[in-house]
Image (cartoon, rainbow, N blue to C red):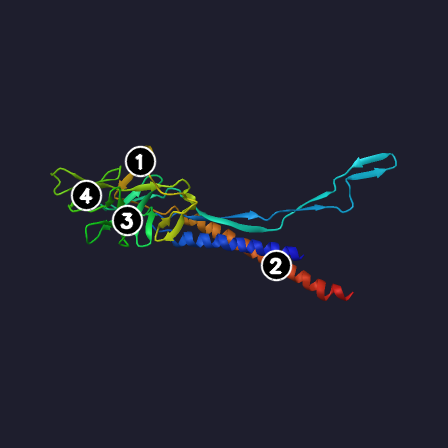
């Protein structure tokens, strides 16, 4: 009976972790480049129930027959395993803004922040006061040769990420730099830093420049929306709430049975 209390409580804790991930997804449903989180759980080791003083043999006067001394397995609850990010492509939204960029496939833009180099899928950029391509928070977007400084009025960014500028539409285009796009061997282990930023760690592996067929296309005048489906997340939230309430009822039932066992059955 006590085991049932711990089993139900472990189920409630598991649903709390799921609810945290779902709530974060819904809060960032309109954030450009956001990737949804999912919570993963695993079962505690099961107990093998076996009859005592049973060697698996039933004997009778004419002989014997094999029996199964094992009664079966007993589950002991569930535990939180990990939360990880699902890097599915989000929908592309046209903006017609010169400095709004989206990546067609995998990969990340590289941004220089005071905390170090960070990576993002949010391509909502603009020109800062020093004519440097920056995020809306004022962090420089890195090119393959460093900062991307644009000094002319007419700017074109092609699918390869090359930044071209022209003084006038009739003048010859000048190559400024190529936007740096990187990838990771195990991007699911990237650590979220807020504001659509990720940082690398020992599990994700170091950032590597993407080139050739591995390099995603860069689309000018578009932004990648989040890959969160609000309808799916709301359904998941309802499922979590019902599972949590079911475990609450289990705990209430066990508490009532323990009360009857201690206060009533013990009297006889």
158, above or below 196, in the image: above
**Front-lying residue, 183 or 166:** 183
Q: Earlier in the sequence, mark 3 or mark 2?
A: 3
Q: Earlier in the sequence, mark 1 or mark 4?
A: 4
The answer to whether residue 246 is seen in the rendering is: no
Sooner in the amino-acid sequence: mark 3 or mark 4: 3
- How many angstroms separate mark 3 from mark 2 (CA)? 49 Å
Residue 4 in the image: above or below residue 88 = below
Residues tagged 1 and 2 counted as in contact (Cβ below 8 A): no
Question: Residue at label 4?
Answer: 155
Report whether 259 appears left or right of 40.
right
Residue that mark 3 sits on:
124
Res 88 quadrant in image: top left
Q: Position of residue 253 (x, y in %)?
A: 64, 59
Disc 4 from disc 2: Cα separation: 64 Å
Closer mark to the observer between disc 4 and disc 2: 4
Q: Secondary structure at mark 2?
A: helix
Residue for badge 2: 251
């Amino acid at each position: 009976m006590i085991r049932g209390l711990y089993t139900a409580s472990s189920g409630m804790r598991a649903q709390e972790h799921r609810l945290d991930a779902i709530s974060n997804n819904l809060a960032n449903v309109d954030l450009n480049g956001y990737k949804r989180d999912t919570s993963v759980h695993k079962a505690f080791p099961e107990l093998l129930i076996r009859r005592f003083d049973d060697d698996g043999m039933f004997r009778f006067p004419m002989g014997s027959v094999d029996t199964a001394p094992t009664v079966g397995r007993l589950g002991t609850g569930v535990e939180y395993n990990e939360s990880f990010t699902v890097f599915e492509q989000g929908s592309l939204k046209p903006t017609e803004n010169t400095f709004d960029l989206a990546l067609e496939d995998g990969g990340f833009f590289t941004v220089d922040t005071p905390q170090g180099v960070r990576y993002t899928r949010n391509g909502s950029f603009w020109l800062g006061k020093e004519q440097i391509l920056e995020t809306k928070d004022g962090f420089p977007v890195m090119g393959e040769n460093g900062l991307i400084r644009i000094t002319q009025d007419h700017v074109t960014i092609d699918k390869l990420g090359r930044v071209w500028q022209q003084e006038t539409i009739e003048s010859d285009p000048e190559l400024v730099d190529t936007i740096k796009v990187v990838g990771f061997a195990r991007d699911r282990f990237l650590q979220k830093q807020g504001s659509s930023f990720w940082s690398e760690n020992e599990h994700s592996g170091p950032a590597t420049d993407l080139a050739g067929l591995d390099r995603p296309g860069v689309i000018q005048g578009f932004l990648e929306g989040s890959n969160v489906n609000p309808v799916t997340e709301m359904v998941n939230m309802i499922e979590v709430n019902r599972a949590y309430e079911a475990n609450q009822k289990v705990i209430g039932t066990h508490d009532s049975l323990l009360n009857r066992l201690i206060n009533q059955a013990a009297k006889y």
